[in-house]
Image (cartoon, helix red, strand yellow):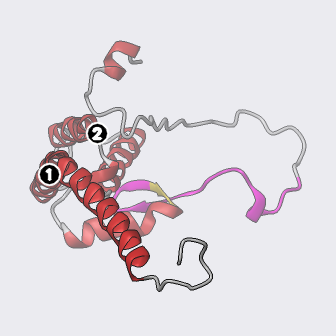
Amino acid sequence: MITLAELNNKRGFLMNEELIVVAKIEVLEVVGNLDVSEEYSPVMKTIDVNGFQVLRSQEESVKSLFERHLNIASKFRPKNSYLKTAYMNVLLSLTQTICQSPQELSNDDLSDAGAALAYLREAGFELDWLEKKLDEVKEKKKKEEACLARIQEIDEQLQPFKKTYLDLEAQIDKEKEELLAARAPLSLNDDNVV
């Protein structure tokens, strides 16, 4: 059990404002048969990847993590399969968060990612590589914010020049009209001609 306050206190339970809840259902008695083909079955089957029960849709991502980071779970302490699944879901959510564009991430998202990383490390995951990636994303976010601020500053400095440019364009158009009028040939059919 966890209180709502603990859930919201940035300890890594929420990733991208989502909470993944894993539940185990034990069948005590089967009454009747349900004739549903396996492809339409709402039950999601899990498979074991290095001791972690994951959904088939997560299998490749988890295998890839273990292939690229052999010792990722070498010091992982929890033995309960449901806790292990929950931790793995947090890790997968964290990797997905870090792979987003800095434009899509808020500073709160990055703060939450840092809390999730600390939470996973506390459980025994070896995540130095992920911490480096998170630091890179944070650095990119800072650079993005600095670039946006500088663009806005330059645009504000440019505004008077844009107005001057538009005024000069209007003057050129007016002078061109006068030039066309000055170049227009006279006609002998005008009433003002003697």
Q: How many marks?
A: 2
Type of residue at label 2? Asp
Report the front residue among 19 and 142: 142
Residue 168 on image: x %, y %? 25, 60
Query: Looking at the image, is mark 1 or mark 2 earlier in the sequence?
Result: 2
Q: Which residue is mark 2?
A: 109
19 magenta-colored: no
Q: Is residue 71 above or below residue 160?
A: below
Label 2: element kind: helix
Q: Is residue 76 above or below residue 12?
A: below
Instruction: Answer left or right for 157 relative to 194.
Output: left
Instruction: From the top left corner, tell me how far across and down residue 93 is, in percent.
Output: 36, 49
**Residue at 14% over, 51% down:** 154
Q: Residue at x 47, y 86 (%)?
A: 185
- Give the spatial CA distance, label 1 vs label 2: 29 Å
- Relative side of 128 to 33, left or right: left
- Residue 34 visible in the current orientation: yes
Helix, strand or loop at label 1? It is helix
- How crowded is the residue under tag 2: few (<14 C-alpha within 10 Å), some, or many (20+)? some
Label for residue 180?
Answer: none
The residue that mark 1 highlights is 154
Residue 46 within the magenta-colored segment of the rendering: yes
In the image, which residues are magenta?
A: 35-53
Image x and y of residue 110, in percent: 23, 41
Identify residue type, mark 1: Ile
Determine the residue positioned at 86% across, 37% down: 31
Residue furthest front in the image: 194
Q: Is residue 104 left or right of residue 25?
A: left
Residue at figure coordinates x 28%, y 40% from the top left: 106
Q: Quadrant of residue 83?
A: top left
